[in-house]
Amino acid sequence: LTGFHIRCKFMYKLATNMEASKMAASGQYSQIGVNKALKTMGLNGTRRPDVIGIANKGLNKLVEVVSPRQSTNYIVNKMSNMLSNNPGTAGKIVTWVRNLF
């Protein structure tokens, strides 16, 4: 791996962990999964969003961090597909990592 790829991977993991930490700190989620399949967390589908929050009450939350190697359109389509299969779930797409590089 080049220095560029190491920096990209580090920033991607940092953003993912920041989102999971914010969800944990909110106290609104009974479960938080990082890189877990939707079905593993009790939702519909086999895709793996970067972060899944199962809400105590209200909307569950899916988070996708767009890495420098991914297109934003690909992630938007992935999120749209996951949300359509999981009513009662909100989505968030984080683009600042992609925009850094």
Image (tube, helix red, strand yellow):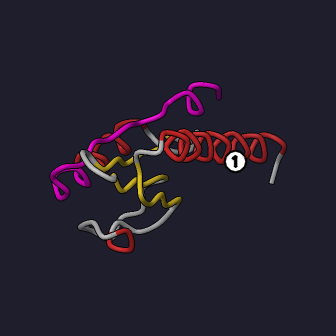
Q: Amino acid at mark 1?
A: Lys
- Among the 4 quarters of the image, the one containing residue 71: top left
90 drawn magenta: yes
Query: What residue is at 38 percent from the left and 37 percent from the top?
Result: 92
Q: Position of residue 88 (x, y in %)?
A: 18, 49
**Furthest residue to the right?**
3
Vertical order, 71 against 48 (above or below) = above
The front one of 66 and 71 is 66
Element under disc 1? helix
Range of magenta residues: 81-101
Q: Quadrant of the C terminus?
A: top right
The front one of 9 and 44 is 44
Query: What residue is at 23 percent from the left and 67 percent from the top?
Result: 44
Q: Position of residue 97 (x, y in %)?
A: 60, 33
4 drawn magenta: no
Q: Position of residue 75 (x, y in %)?
A: 38, 44
The front one of 80 and 23 is 23
Q: Residues within 10 Å of mark 1 (few under 14, many from 20)?
A: some
Query: What residue is at 84 percent from the left and 43 percent from the top?
Result: 3
Q: Quadrant of the N terminus?
A: bottom right
- Relative horizontal placement of residue 82, taking residue 69 as reference (left or right): left
Q: Position of residue 39 (x, y in %)?
A: 32, 72
- Relative horizontal placement of residue 30, taking residue 76 as reference (left or right): right
- Relative horizontal placement of residue 8, taking residue 55 as reference (left or right): right
- Relative horizontal placement of residue 4, taking residue 53 as reference (left or right): right
Q: Which residue is mark 1?
A: 9
Vertical order, 85 against 44 (above or below) = above
Query: What residue is at 47 percent from the left and 45 percent from the top?
Result: 27
- Among the 4 quarters of the image, the one containing residue 30: bottom left
